[in-house]
Image (tube, rainbow, N blue to C red):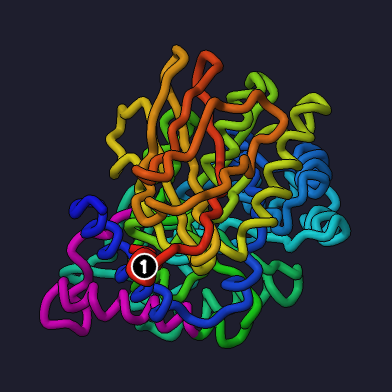
Amino acid sequence: MHSAYGALHSAAAALTAHRRALVRPHPDRARLPVVFNDYMNTLMGDPTTAKLVPLIDAAAEAGAEVFCIDAGWYDDDGDWWDSVGEWKPSQTRFPQGIEEVLSHIRERGMVPGLWLEPEVIGVRSPMAGKLPAEAFLQRSGTRIVEHGRYHLDLRHPAAVAHLDEVVDRLVEQLGVGYFKLDYNIDPGAGTDVDAVSPGAGLLACNRAHQAWLEAVLDRHPDLILENCASGAMRMDYALLSRMQLQSTSDQQDPLLYPPIAVAAPLSVLPEQSASWAYPQPGMDDERVAYSLCTGMLGRLYLSGHLPTMTGAQREAVRAAVAAYRDIRTDLATAVPVWPLGLPDWADPWLSLGLTTPDHTYVGVWCRADERATASPSLPHLAGRQADVEVVYPRHLPAWDGEWDQETGQLVLGKPVPGPSARIFRVSAALPSSPDSSHLL
């Protein structure tokens, strides 16, 4: 085994085990439901009943288990950025009420979800005048304003009471079972209220935020919380030990997303790592599969204009969801490896492996326009016979490939032009000696 490979992956294995020891118990940890979110490259913050119903039906047919309505559901006038904070459903976007849409999500067998940015109050929000000044971050006696928003100080009982009312109302009255929690501002150094310094105030506020999250989950133990924070701005285990999954990026270009998805398990558990898979009707078959593969070795996080896809395209999405649901139990206990090394942004070939005692799942993305070859390395399987099968996509031309038992390499050739991706399952025979049984 190469020493650099072994050192990197031993460290990653230790970090992965440590993070799993940190996380709060939650039913989501075992279920790992497939999430469809209407935002990325799809509704982009402009949900309405008319737009959502076809998406809900298509997502359900694809096999999604959660449907999250993203930003905009509270907006009546199209200028919502500095007016957020009450979190009451729009009447213009949902003429019969958002209840109609949420009920339709449940009727199609999915958990309803909503986007929420709980820690902010827009300067034009009614809540800006209803809450006391002490409920907001301040410096030198002045309320902090950042990009048209105030920031709540969750040390203050009025701020906590407001957010508890919002969450409890949406969960108990509207049946919401999933929140995508966003965070799109930076309040700077912190607050000097009841603190020896702004930094000390900020630390106390962060701890109050964590306590609020804990209390929410204590009251609603099945509620699923996604940590978004402007595309992974706060991807840390102060939050991820409490929340169930993490949006890895707001990257909109499917060709550019794989380096993010491949690198993510070095920082976040695979089963919490939600990378967008947003296939679109205008993509060719290989590009649809490429986009879907990006989400499959983590939390499959779907979007895209599924209703206007062809029947064959919709079937490709269904097949990806079915394949993911078949392997996700393994992903929740897997250890990450990087068969082509950690990714560079412009690498033509990228690979992520997730290893279990029985299988190694290997995602491989090729961004070269021409036909090309690569040899992802799995030295923990060197010297062992192995079966290699395609997990997804099975409906497209097979890549050329063979297992080199002596070197522990998966020798691959991409026989099609243009970007292409595949997810493989490598199942090795039992090692012939005790020394070769170590995973890393």
Q: Residue at x 63, y 81 (%)?
A: 220
Give the side of residue 165 with respect to residue 418, left or right. right
Residue sitting farthest toward the front: 432
Query: Residue 10, how many percent across, how many down?
Result: 28, 64
Amino acid type, callout 1: His
Could you tell me if residue 207 is visible in this image?
Answer: yes
Q: Residue at x 38, y 51 (%)?
A: 382
Q: Residue at x 77, y 50 (%)?
A: 63
Could you tell me if residue 123 is visible in this image?
Answer: no
Q: Which residue is mark 1?
A: 438
Residue sitting farthest toward the left: 196
Crowding at dot 1, Cα within 10 Å, few <14 / some 14-19 / many 20+, comes out as few
Q: Which residues are magenta?
A: 185-214
Query: Residue 106, how many percent across, how many down?
Result: 82, 61
Taking depth in this image into account, of 264 and 126 the one nearest to the observer is: 264
Taking depth in this image into account, of 92 and 337 the one nearest to the observer is: 337
Q: Is residue 63 above or below residue 129?
A: above
Taking depth in this image into account, of 230 and 224 the one nearest to the observer is: 224
Check if residue 207 falls in the magenta segment.
yes
